[in-house]
Image: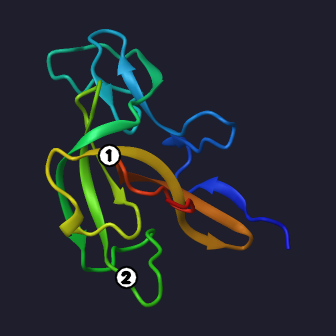
């Protein structure tokens, strides 16, 4: 059986690292004032004091610190695809190291709210959100430093 084709669940929001480079979120940086945005912005600067409409696409920091976290005890609405039966998972709002931008994402499988604390350092990894018709649909997740990445042994 051929391996599944790996594709982003949301196109253009992150790189997968399949090219040998480290995976990264794709954001934008305002050319006028330097304000970062995720997902990438193409129309207006999110800084209310800036009127620039010029942006460059940038790879955002792969590491940050947990700003807030919770567990998802309810099944999110579509387009999210949950396991059947539904298995709760953790979400973390992570302040990226260089950009000082907070980005929400799932935490890797096996990590519970009891394993997390505000201020913990995490890094971005790519994992399968769901599989369908020979494709693995990928999403970014946050992995506490020192934890095992999805699909890797400790």
Q: Residue at x 62, y 71 (%)?
A: 131
Q: Residue at x 29, y 66 (%)?
A: 90
For the residues marked 1 and 2, what is the alpha-carbon distance in whole angstroms?
22 Å
Q: Position of residue 140 (x, y in %)?
A: 46, 51
Q: Residue furthest front?
A: 154
- Dividing the picture into quadrants, the one containing residue 87 is bottom left
Secondary structure of residue under mark 2: loop
Q: Residue at x 32, y 66 (%)?
A: 111
Q: Is residue 74 left or right of residue 85?
A: left
Q: Is residue 112 left or right of residue 56?
A: left
- Up the image or down, 128 lies above or below 72; here it is above
Q: Which residue is mark 1?
A: 122
Q: Residue furthest right?
A: 1
- Up the image or down, 4 lies above or below 31; here it is below
**Mark 2, residues whose alpha carbon is within 10 Å: few (<14), some, or many (≥20)?**
few
Secondary structure of residue under mark 1: strand
Q: Residue at x 64, y 64 (%)?
A: 136
First along the sequence among labels 1 and 2: 2
Q: Which residue is mark 2?
A: 87
Mark carried by residue 42? none
Q: Residue furthest bottom?
A: 85
Q: Position of residue 97 (x, y in %)?
A: 28, 30
Q: Position of residue 16 (x, y in %)?
A: 59, 45
Q: Is residue 2 left or right of residue 153?
A: right
Q: Position of residue 132 (x, y in %)?
A: 66, 73
Circles 1 and 2: CB atoms closer than 8 Å: no
């Amino acid at each position: 059986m051929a391996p599944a084709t790996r594709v982003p669940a949301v196109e253009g929001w992150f790189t997968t690292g399949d090219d040998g480079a480290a995976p990264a979120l794709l954001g934008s940086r305002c050319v006028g004032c330097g304000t970062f945005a995720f997902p990438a912005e193409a129309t207006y600067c999110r800084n209310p004091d800036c009127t620039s409409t010029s942006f460059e696409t940038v790879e955002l920091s792969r590491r940050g610190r947990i700003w807030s976290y919770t567990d998802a005890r309810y099944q999110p609405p579509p387009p999210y695809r949950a396991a059947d039966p539904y298995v709760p998972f953790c979400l973390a709002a992570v302040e990226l190291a260089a950009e000082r931008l907070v980005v929400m994402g799932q935490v890797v499988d096996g990590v519970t709210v009891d394993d997390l604390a505000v201020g913990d350092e995490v890094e971005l990894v790519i994992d399968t959100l769901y599989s369908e018709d020979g494709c693995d649909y990928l999403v970014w997740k946050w992995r506490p430093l020192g934890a095992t990445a999805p699909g890797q042994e400790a």
